[in-house]
Every structure is written in structure tokens, then in C-alpha cells.
Image (cartoon, rainbow, N blue to C red):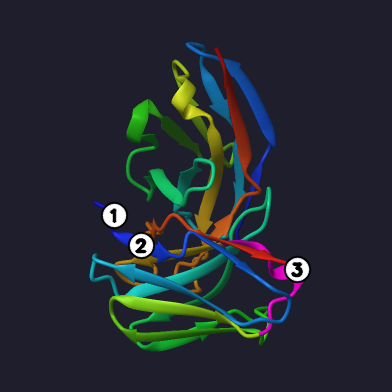
Amino acid sequence: AQSVTQLDSHVSVSEGTPVLLRCNYSSSYSPSLFWYVQHPNKGLQLLLKYTSAATLVKGINGFEAEFKKSETSFHLTKPSAHMSDAAEYFCVVTRYNQGGKLIFGQGTELSVKP
Amino acid sequence: DAMVIQNPRYQVTQFGKPVTLSCSQTLNHNVMYWYQQKSSQAPKLLFHYYDKDFNNEADTPDNFQSRRPNTSFCFLDIRSPGLGDAAMYLCATSRARGASGELFFGEGSRLTVL
């Protein structure tokens, strides 16, 4: 069975400092992994995805994530936080044998202080 | 340009009074999804359509129904809303079922039940 665990429910950083949002996954198969972002009262937007190609994945808005099979991790990073990055972030794995339905982590709320 | 459009963005109803939420898409995607998202929680899949093929999640209450009259439109009907149904309802589309987990979300319809 597949699952994801987001290790922090809330992360607070200062503008201009690095961002690290942690995600661990469990999968019996080679997983497809994603990060989605949700700004307040908005829908979700795909930030980036890993589908067994390069292990370092670059996404939109300067975010990137590294797939580490040995650590079963897919942490999201950004070198320098911007105020507009304040949002909820979801780590997601697809349900391999059920039509690719998404399994969401519980989310990490990112706050950015001026 | 908005590609997945949900209406209304905000809906207030009374306990037990039926509600219909609508979703339209300009992407010509085969798959459409309805998610329920309660405060500070991850989205929960209610059901999805693969073309006209309806797929209900096992734990979706009977109170929730859906219609997809054509490729572009999908409706969520809540027959007798209870206080526990207050949530954000998200519509999403994908090109094909299992299409690498990339979903395109609308901005959501927030339902308040009085």
C-alpha cells in the first residue's frame, strides 16, 4: 500500500531564507510523487512531479525536490522564501493499481515572516 | 485563463436544503473528480468520472450524487446537507485516468450549512 507522511504540520521561515518541507513515502512499487500548493481559499496547483526520471526535480516558482529512494523521502526545498510562498503544501503519491488516484499527505502550512 | 471553473465560489444553505455545485472545464479532459476538503485537512476524493463511467469511492455517503451531462460539465448534488458537510468542494480534471497524477483544480466552492 502507498502512503505519504509530511513530517511538519507547520513551518515558519523569514523572507529570503531557505525553505525545507519534509515528506516521507511508503510504496511497494516505484512511486510517482508530487508536490501541490494551495493558497488560501484557492484550488490546488501542481508544483512539481517525480515519475522515475531524474531524481532532482525542478518545479515552478523556484521550488525543487529530490527523490531519495534509500531514505524514502521527497523533500521540497527553495533557496530563498518569498512572501507569496505562504500557503499549504501537500505531498502526494499516486495509488499505483487504482487508476492513479492521489493519496495526499496531511499538508504543511508554510508561513513567511517579513 | 481559467481552465476549471467552479460555481458558485461560496454557497450558503440551510440544514437539509439540497444544493448543486457546478464545474466546467475547457481542457477537454476525459477525467473529472470531486474532492471534499474540510478545514486544515487534505482533500478527500468523493468520486470521479472517466468519460461517462462513474466511479464512487466506497466511503462516499449516499447523500452525495454527481452528474456529468457532457465532457465539459460536472455537477455535485448534495441531497440533504448536514452540518458535517460544510467544506470546500474541489473539482479537478486530468487528461486520462492515472495520467501521472497531474490534476488541474478549480478554485473550489465553499459550502456553509446553517
Q: Residue at x 45, y 15 (%)?
A: A80
Above or below — where is B82 with respect to A113? below
Q: Position of residue A87 (x, y in %)?
A: 54, 35
First of labels 3, 1 by sequence position: 1
Q: Secondary structure at mark 2?
A: strand
Q: Secondary structure at mark 1?
A: loop
> What's under tag 3, amino acid-wise?
Gly
Pointer 1 chain: B
Above or below — where is A14 with respect to B86? above
The residue beneath circle 3 is B84
Pointer 3 chain: B
Task: Left or right? Give the position of B74 relative to B30.
Answer: right
> What's under tag 2, amino acid-wise?
Ile
Q: Alpha carbon of mark 3 to alpha carbon of mark 1: how far? A: 30 Å
- Mark 3 touches mark 2? (CB < 8 Å): no
Question: Residue B5's mark?
Answer: 2
Q: Are marks 3 and 2 on the same chain?
A: yes
Quarter residue A111 falls in: top right
Q: Residue at x 28, y 80 (%)?
A: B71
Above or below — where is B89 with respect to A49? below
Q: Residues within 10 Å of mark 2 (few under 14, many from 20)?
A: many
The residue beneath circle 1 is B2
- Mark 1 touches mark 2? (CB < 8 Å): yes
Q: Alpha carbon of mark 1 to alpha carbon of mark 2: how far? A: 6 Å
Q: Is residue A36 visible?
A: yes
Which span of residues is magenta-colored? B80-88
* Magenta residue check for A84: no
